[in-house]
Image (cartoon, rainbow, N blue to C red):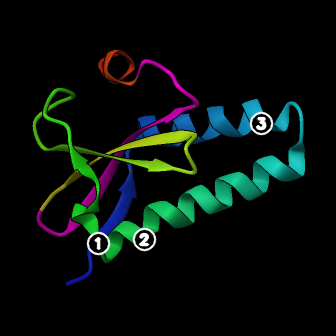
Amino acid sequence: MAFKVAFRPRAEKDLFDIYEFIAADNFPAAIEFIRRLRQFCHQLEDMPERGSPREDFAPGVRILVFERRVTIAYRITKHRVQVLRLFYAGRNTPSAFHRN
């Protein structure tokens, strides 16, 4: 059964922040990077359990790394994969996860 991938509002803001950071140096690269990142997240529709469980973040949270630069935090529900946060390039992920 395929799951539907949904980005939580905070994850959408993270995407925008990542885009802005990259676009400051290279606009076309930013567009392409975000396209690849979204595509990668949508691959969770078919294999949602491929990320590593991280109960230290919050109950039910899993993480997956994209191109060694983005840590994706997500949760699997009955029919959906909720992308909770996206952390770019080495941020202190566990502490940032709990900040708004």
Q: Is residue 40 left or right of residue 77?
A: right
What x and y, as percent, mark residue 54? 19, 37
The kind of secondary structure the magenta stretch mainly shows is: strand
SS under mark 2? helix
The residue shown at (31%, 22%) is 94
What x and y, as percent, mark residue 18? 65, 36
Farthest bottom residue?
Answer: 1
Are the residues tagged 3 and 1 within 8 Å (C-beta)? no
Q: On the image, numbered disc 2 is attached to which residue?
A: 43
- As shown in the figure, which amino acid type bears the numbered disc 2? Gln
Q: On the image, numbered disc 3 is attached to which residue?
A: 22
- As shown in the figure, which amino acid type bears the numbered disc 3? Ile
- 3 relative to 86, above or below: below
- What is the quadrant of residue 56 in the picture? top left
Packing grade of label 1 (10 A; few <14, some 14-19, many >=20) is: few
Are the residues tagged 1 and 2 within 8 Å (C-beta)? yes
Task: Kindly identify which numbered label has been placed on residue 47.
Answer: 1
